[in-house]
């Protein structure tokens, strides 16, 4: 088979922007003040906070991965866009809660005040809870997929990826490693394996999920779902390494949020453990591994490979 | 048809205790440190906080209502007990978050320290998030019901009952009515209709849900699901009025949590609006209305009617 060539960066950014606009429109429709069947009213203040959290920012990389995974099997439409928007809601809830003073204590997110700064802490907690709930609501809604078995599967996969044994558990491990509950209050020195496990939970699971979910929605075989899942796990690791590199190398201005915080907290990252050059080399290895997983789809996977490049090489 | 007679209070308490023990056992199995498929690890500290929130307390009235609703149509088994436990997880997450200093600021719950007092605020936020997620996980799990259409329907109904247009939205309305975000910081005088709407969202939706869900799991007709839903709405209102009466009449010792807080906050309740005697009369009217909804099932509904009595007349 011919070597897979990624979509060019410029062409990729075009597709990413177009899909981002589409996801934004779906989020705008789903997160509004109109009460749905079996609801009473949607109070304006909490809807405003939810909209602050989900609209007008973000690269929408997770939704994009889901849309492209479904496209690989010929499925493209409103249902996938809804599921992709649901995932973005869940991602945004996690940012709202993680930004709280009790957790990571961030004032800035995507260049704007975090929800608890723009509103207040009670509203931020509730808006996060409501976004998490609306994510599962959207996944389970018949408008998202005609087959209830697929909808139930999406809910179960998303819950496992984001719950106590996934993203939320990863955040817990991260706070624990900061030394919050250790006898001496000092950060824990994590091993390479411990850091990888923590990151696979905290950020990896929600980057892997869209690739599997898109394939599931498109009726892909179990083998293909698993293969895209492996690609997703690679992308998740690359995302985190790129993030850690940016925390060391980038400015707060470029990132739209505080940088240098991980090092200040003594947070264990692979970059801190192995150094910057080793991690740039690791990213190259990950890109090669990603291309290998996508090879069976040859040029149809050019956009997904470009996404992997984009994630590994992003500057903000 | 003969007038429906409720199970005796003593016999009812026996059934309630037996089912409570069963639900406790299911929760003990579901909320543990064993990672499930598609999970990585379940960190001990968050699992401990989740267990503190869900085990060893509570009357389990919501799970009980689901089990009895399913039983009305001849369904009784592990699947319903799992769904009932999922609902209890969701209920307990809402208590954990509502108890936070940013919200209702309670130190005591069921006679024990609240999660953020027994652990800390970050752990409480995450444990709540994880319980909410695990509730949807459990509903979507094939072990809960063989039919994926039923599982997806349970997820959707639970999300609508508990999200922005249900329970979470109701908590938002409640905090708003306290005057947190008003110009003068004073509580809002709510009308009778506004109080009923707020309470239908904040507490009613999660008491109505189990009756509809139990019927759905048992394959009941749409008309029967709707009838049990109306019974659930009545029970929900009775629950809240009884709660408001207890806040005025009971001692903290009997309740295992602080009392008199609503009045101290100038919180609008039907009791404050209409007085104690009028609300005792309203409870009698609600019991009669509840019995009317259950009449078609005659003595098979004796336990559900006893549950309505228990809820309306409870002393703690």
Image (tube, coloured by chain):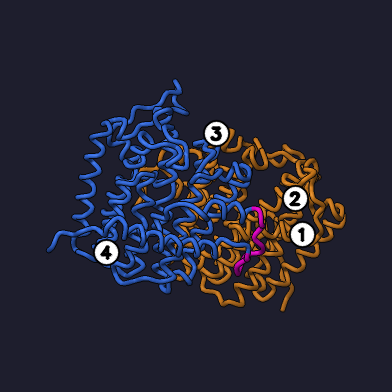
Chain colours: A orange, B blue
Which mark, residue A120?
Answer: 3
Q: CA distance from mark 3 to mark 4?
A: 42 Å
Q: Nearer the viewer, residue A182 or A261?
A: A182
As drawn, the residue found furthest toward the top would be: B184
Q: Do marks 3 and 1 share a subunit?
A: yes
Viewer can see residue A171: yes
Task: Give me the C-alpha separation between circle 4 and circle 2.
Answer: 51 Å
Of helix, strand and loop, which one carries label 2? helix
In the rendering, at what x and y percent does residue B111 appear?
Answer: 50, 44
Specify the quadrant that holds the C terminus of chain B. Answer: top left
- The 10 Å Cα crowd at callout 1, few under 14, some 14 to 19, many 20 or more, is some
Query: Which circle's residue, 2 or 3, is located before the other in the chain?
Result: 3
Q: Nearer the viewer, residue B85 or B160?
A: B85
- How many residues crowd around disc 4 within 10 Å: few (fewer than 14), some, or many (20 or more)? few
Q: Chain of mark 2?
A: A
Q: Chain of mark 3?
A: A
Name the residue nearer the viewer: B269 or A122: B269
Q: Which portion, as a residue range, is magenta? A: B34-45
Q: Select label 3 or label 1 by which is in front.
A: 1
Q: Main secondary structure of the magenta part?
A: loop
Specify which label sits upstream in the sequence, 1 or 2: 2
Mark drawn on residue B222:
4
* Residue B30, above or below B180: below
On whether residue B37 falls in the magenta region, the answer is yes
The residue carrying mark 2 is A177
Residue positioned 59% across, 66% down in the render: A69
Name which quarter of the figure residue B155 lies in. Answer: bottom left
Camera-nearest label, 2 or 3: 2
Determine which residue is flagged by label 1: A194
* Crowd around label 2: few <14 · some 14–19 · many ≥20 (10 Å): many
């Amino acid at each position: 088979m011919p070597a897979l060539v990624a979509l060019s960066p410029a062409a990729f950014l075009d597709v990413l922007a177009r899909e981002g606009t589409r996801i934004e429109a779906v989020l705008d429709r789903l997160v509004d003040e109109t009460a749905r069947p079996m609801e009473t009213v949607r109070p304006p203040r909490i809807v405003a906070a939810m909209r602050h959290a989900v609209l007008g920012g973000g690269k929408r990389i997770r939704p994009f991965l889901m849309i492209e995974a479904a496209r690989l099997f010929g499925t493209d439409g409103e249902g996938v866009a809804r599921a992709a928007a649901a995932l973005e809601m869940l991602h945004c809830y996690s940012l709202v809660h993680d930004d709280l003073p009790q957790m990571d204590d961030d004032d800035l997110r995507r260049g704007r005040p975090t929800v608890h700064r723009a509103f207040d802490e009670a509203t931020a907690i509730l808006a996060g809870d409501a976004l998490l709930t609306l994510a599962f609501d959207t996944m389970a809604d018949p408008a998202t997929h005609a087959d209830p078995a697929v909808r139930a599967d999406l809910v179960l996969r998303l819950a496992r990826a984001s719950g106590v044994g996934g993203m939320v558990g990863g955040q817990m491990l991260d706070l624990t490693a900061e030394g919050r509950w250790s006898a001496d209050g000092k950060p824990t020195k994590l091993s390479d394996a411990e850091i990888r496990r923590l990151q696979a939970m905290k950020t990896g699971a929600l980057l892997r999920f869209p690739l599997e979910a898109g394939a599931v929605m498109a009726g892909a075989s179990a083998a293909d779902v698993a293969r895209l899942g492996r690609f997703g796990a690679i992308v998740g690791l690359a995302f985190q390494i790129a993030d850690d590199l940016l925390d060391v190398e980038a400015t707060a201005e470029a990132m739209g949020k505080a940088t240098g915080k991980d090092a200040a907290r003594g947070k264990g990252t692979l970059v801190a453990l192995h150094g910057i050059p080793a991690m740039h080399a690791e990213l190259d290895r990950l890109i090669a591994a990603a291309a290998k997983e996508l090879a069976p789809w040859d040029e149809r996977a050019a956009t997904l490979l470009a996404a992997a490049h984009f994630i590994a090489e992003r500057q903000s």
